[in-house]
Image (tube, grey):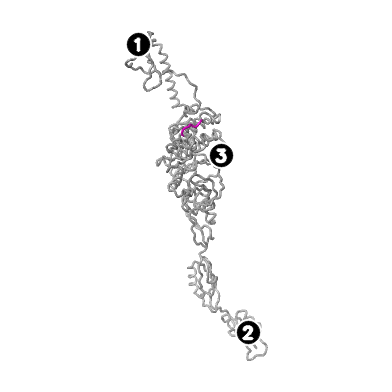
Amino acid sequence: MDVSVSDPMVGRLLDGRYRVGRRIARGGMAMVYEAVDTRLHRTVALKMLHAGLADDADFVRRFHREARSAARLSHPHVVAMFDQGEDDGTPYLTMEYVPGRTLRHELSSRGRLDPREALTFLDLILQALATAHEADLIHRDVKPENVLLGDDGSVKVADFGLARAVSQATSTATQGLLIGTVSYLAPEQLTHGAATARGDVYAAGIMLYEMLVGAKPHDGDSPIQVAYKHVNDDVPPPSQAVPGIPAYVDGLVLRATARDPNQRPADARAFLQLVRRARSALGQGVDDAQLTQDLGMAQRQGQPSQPPRAEHTLVAPMEPMPAGAHRQGGRLGPFTPSGAPGVVGVRQPSYDDEDYEGRPPPPWWRRLWVIGAFVLALFVVAGSVCWLAAVGPFTRVPEVIGTSRAALPQLGERSGVVFVPRLVFHEQVPKDRVIRSIPTRGERMFRGGTVEVWVSRGPERHLVPNVIGMTERRARRVVTGANLAVAPIQQEYNSDVEAGRVIRTSPTPDTPLRRDAPVTLVVSRGPEPLSIPSVVGLEITQATTTLEGLGLTVARSDAFSDTVPPNAVISQDPQPGQGHRGDTVNLVVSKGPEFIPVPDVVRMGEEEATKALTDAGFEVEVRQSSLYLGMNVIASQNPPAGQPTRVGSTIILEKV
C-alpha cells in the first residue's frame, strides 16, 4: 500500500490540523495520503478530491455523499469515517488508517487462493456489504482494490464513495459517466445503468471467481470488449480452470454471477447464508448435494450438456375433425396442435371407435397396483418434505434481540444453534442484552450452525484521568490515551503551580464521560506579575494594607532609629520595582531612638572609661578638672552613671 511519489501535498498542514504524509493510493476520484491528526495525535487516511474535479459541483456532491454514506455504517469490516472538510477549495475526508495491503496485492503475490481461504475472505466482505444493504446503501465498486487486509489480520471494505441511497437513485450513470469498474459491473449496470444490491452480489461473485482461479472470468483488449462479454457470456465454473473445486463452490460463483439479476441472491445477506453453508461443508469435508441443488446448478450456456435422453411422443388432446378430413388406413392422420408448432401429436384411440381392432379394455383390478404405487410414492415424498421442514438438518434462527446473555446457551440448545457473542458498547441497550444477530430472526440454517450475536456492554464510558501537576504535553497524551479529547487549553496565573503545569481539569478527575468527550485543561502561567510600590516612611499598618492588597506577603522586623518615628517603615526588601503576586516583602519598622543606662566609669583610668562608654554606644569627651594632678583618673561623668540616655549621646568625663 506504499506509493513513493513526489507530491506537493506531502508535508502540508491541511486545514490547520492534518499533517500530510506519504501518498498511499490513487483512485479515479481522489488521492489518498497517510496523515497525522495533530489535534488527537493519531494516524489517519486522508482522501483528497483530484484538483480537476474540485470545480465540478456534481463530483463534489458525490464526494461529500461518500462521507455521509460511510458515516452511517458502523461495522468492524467497514473502514470508519472520521471527518470531512475543505482546504483552499479542495474537499477532503479523513478515515481510519489500515496499515497493510489490499486483496489485489495478495492475489498478485499468491496467484490464487484455496477454496476455504477464498470463502473466508468472501464471508468477511459480505458481512460489510450486508450491513450497507440493510442501510439501503449500495457500494457499486466492489473489487479487490477496495478490500484492505490489515497487518493485524483485519479485513475491511473501503471506498463507499460510489455508494448511493437506494431510495434516492438507482442509476450508475451520471451525466454520461459510468461509475464503477468494468470488470466487476453486472450486465444490467452496463445495459440499463441500474445499480441494485444484486449488482454488488454480482461483483462479489466475480471476486470469488478471481480468488479461486487467479484471473478474471472475462478479459479483452479494451473495456468495451470486457463489457460485451459480461452482457453476452456466462461466467464459466471455476473448476474448468482449476480442477478439484467442489460443485457447490462452482454453484456459488454461477448463482452470484447469473446474467439475469432475478436468479442471483437478493442481497449480500442472502449470499452470505449460501457462503456459510459452503464453508461448513468444506470444513466437514463433505459433498453437500443439497446445497448444490439449492444453488440451482442448471445447464448454463457454454457448459457441457447432459447426454441426450429418449423422448416420448407428445399426445395432444382430441379435436373435432375439420371439414374435408379423410381417414388414412381407418385411423386419424397426424396433426400439429395449436400453440405447439413442430410437435407431432396423434389422437388418443378410443375403445368406442368403430375402426378400433376390437380388443376389450383391461379389467379394472389390473390397474390397482399402479394407483397404489402412485399413492405410496406421494406419501413418501410428502413425509420427506415434512421431515426436512420440521426436523431434518435445518432449523430457524430464534428471536434473540433483547435476550440476556446468560439465557443464550439455553435458547441455543432449544433452537439447535450455537450463539457466538460479540461485546460492543451501546448507548440505549442495557448491559448484557442482545442488540442484533447474524443470521437474523427466522432465517433458515443448518442445525448446530453458529449465530453471531452482538451483546451490549452498556454505554461506553471512560474516566477522566488525574493529570493535575503534569506538564501540558504529558497531560494531553494521558487524556487522549484514555479515549477522551482535549478541549482548547485555558491558562491562568497561579503562584502555587509552576508555569506550564496543569492546575485543574474540567470535568474533575474520575468523572465518567463518553468516548472522545472533551476535557478542558487549565494550565498555570506562573505567578502574576505586578509592580511593587515604595512604603518606606509609611506607618506599618498602612504599609501592610497596601502590600497585601496587591497580593504580596509582608514580613516584619523591628529596629531602633534616631531619624524614623516609631512604627514607621525604615526600609523594604525587595526595593520598589517588578515582582509577582505572592512574593514576600520584608519591612524594617522603627522602634524609635534607643535609651540605655550610662555605665559607671568614675575612678577608672581615662582609656578604660573611654572604651567602656564607646562599647555601650556613646560618644566620649574627656576634660581636665580644676584640680588636675596628671593622674588621668576619671573624677566625674555627665550624665551620671545609671541615667537612661539615648544611644549615641556624648558623655563628658573629667579627669584628675
Residue furthest out toward the left: 323
Query: Mark 3 = which residue?
Result: 106
Ranked by sequence position, the earlier of labels 1 and 2 is 1
Ranked by sequence position, the earlier of labels 3 and 1 is 3
Q: Quadrant of the C terminus?
A: bottom right
Say which residue appears at 42% left-offset and 40% top-offset. Answer: 171
Asked if 598 appears above or below 189 in the picture, the reply is below
Q: Is residue 379 visible?
A: yes
Highlighted range, magenta:
231-236
Q: For the residues marked 3 and 2, what is the alpha-carbon distance in whole angstroms?
A: 118 Å
Asked if 5 appears above or below 647 in the picture, the reply is above
* Disc 3 and disc 2 in contact, CB within 8 angstroms: no
Query: Mark 1 = which residue?
Result: 353
Residue 598 appears in which quarter of the rendering? Answer: bottom right
Q: Quadrant of the N terminus?
A: top right
Q: Secondary structure at mark 3?
A: helix
Residue 484 place in picture, x, y as percent: 49, 50
Query: Foreground residue, 539 or 132?
Result: 132
Asked if 51 appears above or below 295 in the picture, the reply is below
Query: Mark 2 = which residue?
Result: 602
